[in-house]
Amino acid sequence: MDYEVLIVGGGFSGAEAAYALANRGVKVGLATTSLDSVYLPFTPVQPPYPKGSLLAEVGPLSQRGWALHSQAKYRLENHPKIHLLQLSATRLLLEGWRVVGIESWEGPRKTAPKVVLAVGSFLSPKLYIGNVVEEAGRLSEAAYPDLYLHLQELGFRFAPQTAEVAPQEGTPGYRVEYQVFAPGEWEAHTFRLPRVEGLYGVGLCVLGRGSYAQMVEEGMRLAKLL
């Protein structure tokens, strides 16, 4: 196996889970469609900063977008137990009904006995900005269309969710409609997506909504259970 845990999605919940696991000595692969958007917030991040989190380290240094991203990404990519990967996950690698890794649009396969989906608002999203509609989870960020279709083929059910992002610092406001795992597909106390053994979900893709602090806390809580 390439890793002990493989996390798909480099937002707040996925990155915090990776950081907490790595600090315990677990070898983690953190895969995201773009390394330029790792730990990049939609809006300025305000306290509280959960104790012991990556956010607690970088939040007081800068609460705003790119500066926060830069501080967090530096810590993630320099951690000896974390391998940051720019890969677009398309399918789960399965042995029967047990997950053993992911396939990617770019070609490489990565393996691990535990896979975490932390894909936020990027499952079958539609972004509305003015008269334009894009297949994006937020401005200029690609979705996971193949992964979504694959999860449907495996029998997973989904429910629609909507988020509004207000205009800020010269960026226009927009609306995103996306899919989250339907009630009953996810066990909140274990984070398991029990249709597939070894598969877990964390963050917006299972909760639907939540604050940055909540996403951070969920990532840390998952790390304690894995």
Image (tube, grey):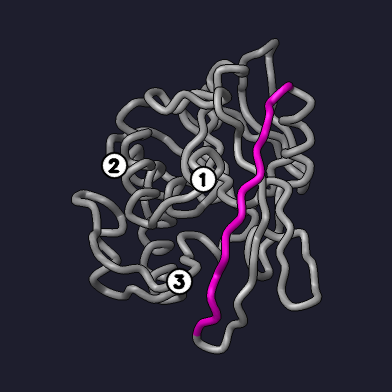
Q: Earlier in the sequence, mark 3 or mark 1?
A: 1
> Compared with residue 38, is residue 204 higher up or lower down, i.e. above or below?
above
Give the crowd class for mark 2: few <14, some 14-19, many >=20 residues within 10 Å: some
Residue identified by numbered label 3: 43
What residue type is disc 3 on?
Thr
Give the crowd class for mark 3: few <14, some 14-19, many >=20 residues within 10 Å: some
**Residues at discs 3 and 1 in contact (Cβ within 8 Å):** no
**Residue 162 part of the magenta-drawn span:** yes
Q: Secondary structure at mark 2?
A: helix
Residue identified by numbered label 1: 30
Q: Nearer the viewer, residue 59 or 156?
A: 156
Quarter in which the N terminus is drawn: top right
Q: Earlier in the sequence, mark 3 or mark 2?
A: 2
Distance from disc 1 to disc 2, alpha carbons, whole Å, reads 14 Å
What residue type is disc 1 on?
Leu
218 on left or right of 2:
left
Q: Earlier in the sequence, mark 1 or mark 2?
A: 2
Q: Which residues are magenta?
A: 155-168
> Compared with residue 66, is residue 156 higher up or lower down, i.e. above or below?
above
Q: What is the quadrant of residue 90 in the picture?
A: top right
Q: Position of residue 99 (x, y in %)?
A: 62, 21
Residue identified by numbered label 2: 23
What residue type is disc 2 on?
Asn
